[in-house]
Every structure is written in C-alpha cells, then in structure tokens.
Image (cartoon, rainbow, N blue to C red):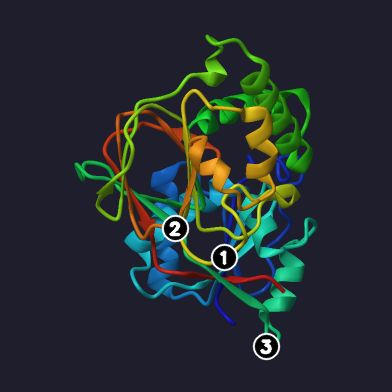
Amino acid sequence: MTRIGVVRNPKSHGNRLHPPGPAPEGVVLVEPFGRDALRTALEDFARDGLDLLVIDGGDGTVRDVISLLPHTFGENLPMLAVLPSGKTNVLAIDLGTPDDWRLEEALVAARRSEPTVKSRPPLRVSWTDGHRPCLQGFFFGVGAPVKATTLAQKVHKVGFFHNLAVAVTIVTAALRAVFGGSRDEWREGVPATIALDGEIQPEGERFAVLATALKRLPFGVMPFGAPREGLKLLDVDAPPRRLLKAFPMVLSGKVAPALEGMGYRRRDPREISLAGGAPFVLDGEVFEGGELTIGLGPALRFLVG
C-alpha cells in the first residue's frame, strides 16, 4: 500500500495532549475541522487515489468519516484502519484492535505481504423525507440509549473513560431503571412505530430500541444474543417489566423464551423502519429523529494487524 492518508481528530480524548509529529514519508495527514472540511479532505484523497485511509479518533470520528465515504469515494473504497484514540472505541473493541495501536504499527501492518483484514458492514440510517444525508455507523439506539449517552458525557467529565466509562454508565442506568419509581425518567418510554422488513411490530412506547452490525461489545455483553453476522435488533417495551430478572439475562445473551413474553424481543431483520420522532443516538452522538430506515451499507474492510 503506497498511497496512505490519515484523518486525525485533534479533539479526540487520546489526541488532545499529543500533537502529531511529522507525517512519515508517503503519508498525507489532515486534521479537518467540521463536516465540510472533512468532506473536502476526503474528496482530495479520492481524487488523488488512496490505498489506505487511517482514522485517528473515536467512534464519532469513524462515523463522520464513513458517512461521507459514499459521497466522496463512491464504490472505490480504500481499506480503512482505526487508531483507537477516542473515549470508548467500541468499533476498535469489536475489531480486536490493540488499545495502544498507533500510526507506526498500522503502517508496518499495511506493508506486510498478507496483512490481517476484517470486514464489517456499517448501519446506514436514512431519513425517508430525503432532506438530510444518510449517516453510517455501528451502534444505533432510541429511548434509554439516548439518556445513557447524556449520562456518559457526564461520566467523561468526571474523568472516567474507555471501558470504565462504559461500566459506570451501564451500572448507573441499570440502577435507575430497576429501582427508580414509576415516574422515573429512566423507566419512561418514547413513541416508536417499528416495522421489520415491512411487517409492523406490536405498538406501544419503547423503553429501548438497539441495533448494530457489530459482533463484540465491551465487557463481553451480548444484548443481541450470540455473536453473529448481519443486522441485529433488541426491542424493549416501556415500562420495562421485571428488569431486575431480565437485565442480566439480556446482557449475557441468554436465549430464554420468557424474555419475549416480558417484552424483550431480539430480531435479525434486513431492514428496520422506525417512526415516532424520538431522537436517536448513533455511535455516541444524538441526532434528530423522524421517519427512519435502518439497514446495512456495503461492507468496509479494516486493517487490524
């Protein structure tokens, strides 16, 4: 791989105190500020031709980059590599990228005769009105995940990051949802009409709607069941029933018919239609809701070693 570009987010947690040194020979490093500047940088890479695009940032940086790939590179996508310098780095955990993987190691891996490459299709989230460009990412949520994202931002301000931040967020959210009163905000649902592959699902408010194409999550939690390929969904009614019993069963990936009866549904759809207007979170950032379609985009190739 002779043509290598790096998109570095200087505001990522791991990059704030470490300004980049001179780019190695044959490597073009950019630090675009804002979506327009990022798009321009990717257009320049696409015009000049690129074998490897290194993303130096967290999950949000990855989301912003891969959301623009169809509009800049079209179908001629370069191989990608992720340097986990964000606060959570869920994609890097799924790929098995080392926590301390830096640009130098990625370049060594890229120049091997047979580098290790993994393929992952991103989620593609589209507004059906077509007035906004689609987004691509790897972890989608409505309801409780949006509240958890706000909580995680507070956790980060306290000084917890990476897996510790995930653990604190999960435990705090679970305690609020389990032991909070009937009017506690963590037990409230959001309006959501869901159709899976065109089939309308049971109506009512949702405590949480989660979707991903990842196989592995932090701490080995498996809310979608056993690791497998494809689009995976967890749909939970509001208010959540028997959460103290169901929560460990859901996180462990246990297959239990009782979960379905309690309002915890796992599905493997090809496409999800979601209406109701509730905001959603995609890879750590909250976006305006609406009538949405969630499916899988073309698989992306990631260099991991």
| Residue 152 shows up from this direction | no
Residue 169 sits in quarter: top right
Q: Amino acid at mark 3?
A: Glu
Residue 44 sits in quarter: bottom left
| Residue 177 - label | none
Height in image: 110 above or below 177? Answer: below
Q: Residue at x 68, y 90 (%)?
A: 113
Indicate the secondary structure of the residue bearing disc 1.
loop
Q: Position of residue 280 (x, y in %)?
A: 43, 35
Q: Which label's residue is closer to the chain start, 1 or 3?
A: 3
Height in image: 162 above or below 91? Answer: above
Q: Which residue is mark 3?
A: 114
Closest to the observer, 11 or 87 = 87
Q: Which residue is mark 2?
A: 268
Q: Position of residue 108 (x, y in %)?
A: 74, 77
Q: Which label's residue is closer to the chain start, 3 or 2?
A: 3
Height in image: 245 above or below 35? Answer: above
Is 154 on the left-hand or right-hand side of 36?
A: right
Q: Which residue is mark 1?
A: 228
